[in-house]
Each structure stands twice: as structure tokens, then as C-alpha cells.
Amino acid sequence: MISMTVFATIGVIGLIVLVISSFLDDIFDFFGGEPVIPSIAAFATFFGFVGALGYSVAGDDNPGLYTVIAGVAGLLAGGVFYIIFRKFKAIADADDSFVPNLNDLVGKTARVDWWTGDRGSVVATWLGQPRSFKADTLDDATYKSGDVLFISEVIDSSHLVVSKARPVVEA
């Protein structure tokens, strides 16, 4: 018959293996990147601790019942851990090579917020969000609030050159 000490030992060993395998994930990638060892460790951890909890609550009255409950809890925990681990691994391994570049604004439109002389402030949409920029123009025109202009040059992260004419954008 399984005692509470056996359940607790299984739980502690499972927890130790779970922590080590989670931190040393790259070493265990020889399983094809699947979280096999952490999932088995999660099963052992929950099996051991739920079994020990069941044993401490029920005592020797019905050892088969809490063994089954511990097994079901371990399977659920192992399966949930497997699914979550795979999702996080997919996110971590995803291609993150997209780096936004403000030069992508050249040729896009901007709305004049305010304008005085040959400079002012415009609002352009950058990464789906409206963003305010200082702006200069090479035109000899005067703009008013609400005018739509084309971005012809990005000077820095907060400064643009705009004009009424659409610039030629090289691919």
C-alpha cells in the first residue's frame, strides 16, 4: 500500500525535475522540442501532492480512491502543462524579425494639427496609432489645421518633412 511519505516523495521529486527541466529547456530539446520531461514531471508533482493531500484527509479509509484522484489530477496537470508549455515555446520561437522603421511613413499622409510659416505639427498614423510629429515643408505654401499632406522625408523620430505633392517612393 502507498503511504503518504511515498506520495510526498513523488511530489517533491516531480517538482525538482519540473523546475530543473523548465530552466534547462534547451538541453531537453533533443526530444524534438516537445515538453515531454516537464509534462511528466508536472504529472508526478500533482500525483504526489494530491495523493499526499488525499491520504492526509482520508487516512487509510480508502487508499484506492485517493490514488485514482491523484492520478486524474496528475494527468490533468501534465496535459495542461504540456499545452501551455507548447504555446509559450511557439511564442518564444516565433519570427520577431519585424522591426518598425519610421522611413515607412514616406509617401503616407499626415493631417496638419497647427502650422506657422514653414513649420508646424502634423499627425500621422504609425503602427495603427495616431502620432504627432514636428514638421517642416519645402513648399512655399501656407497650411491650415486639417490639411492633408504627404510625408516626403523622415528627419528623426519626431520630425518630418511634408508637402502637398506626393513624393516618389523607391521600392
Image: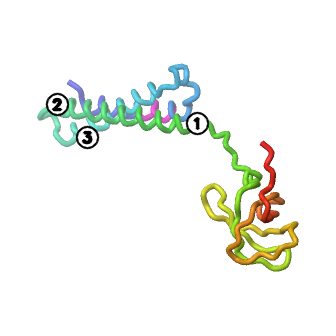
**Magenta: predominant secondary structure element?**
helix
Give the camera-side residue of 167 and 131: 167
At 80% from the left and 55% from the top, the residue drawn is 167
Q: What is the number of callouts on the image?
A: 3
Q: Position of residue 108 (x, y in %)?
A: 71, 57
Residue located farthest toward the left when viewing the structure as drawn: 61
Figure quadrant of residue 158:
bottom right
Residue at the disc numbered 3:
53
Q: CA distance from mark 3 to mark 1?
A: 40 Å
| Residue 19 painted magenta | yes
Q: Position of residue 124 (x, y in %)?
A: 68, 63
- 130 displayed left or right of 58: right
Residue at the disc numbered 1:
94
The residue carrying pointer 3 sits among few (fewer than 14), some (14 to 19) or many (20 or more) residues within 10 Å by Cα, namely some
Figure quadrant of residue 133:
bottom right
Q: Which mark is residue 81?
A: none
Q: Which tag, 3 or 1, sits closer to the chain's start?
A: 3
Give the camera-side residue of 25 and 15: 25
Q: Which tag, 1 or 2, sits closer to the chain's start?
A: 2
| Amino acid type, mark 3 | Leu
Q: Secondary structure at mark 3?
A: helix
Q: Secondary structure at mark 2?
A: helix
Question: Of discs 1 and 2, which sits in the foreground?
Answer: 1
Q: Position of residue 113 (x, y in %)?
A: 70, 74
Q: Position of residue 39 (x, y in %)?
A: 41, 30
At 43% from the left and 38% from the top, the residue drawn is 84
The residue carrying pointer 2 sits among few (fewer than 14), some (14 to 19) or many (20 or more) residues within 10 Å by Cα, namely some
Quarter in which the N terminus is drawn = top left
At 48% from the left and 26% from the top, the residue drawn is 34
Residue at the disc numbered 2:
63
Segment tinted magenta in the rendering: 15-20
Q: CA distance from mark 3 to mark 2?
A: 12 Å
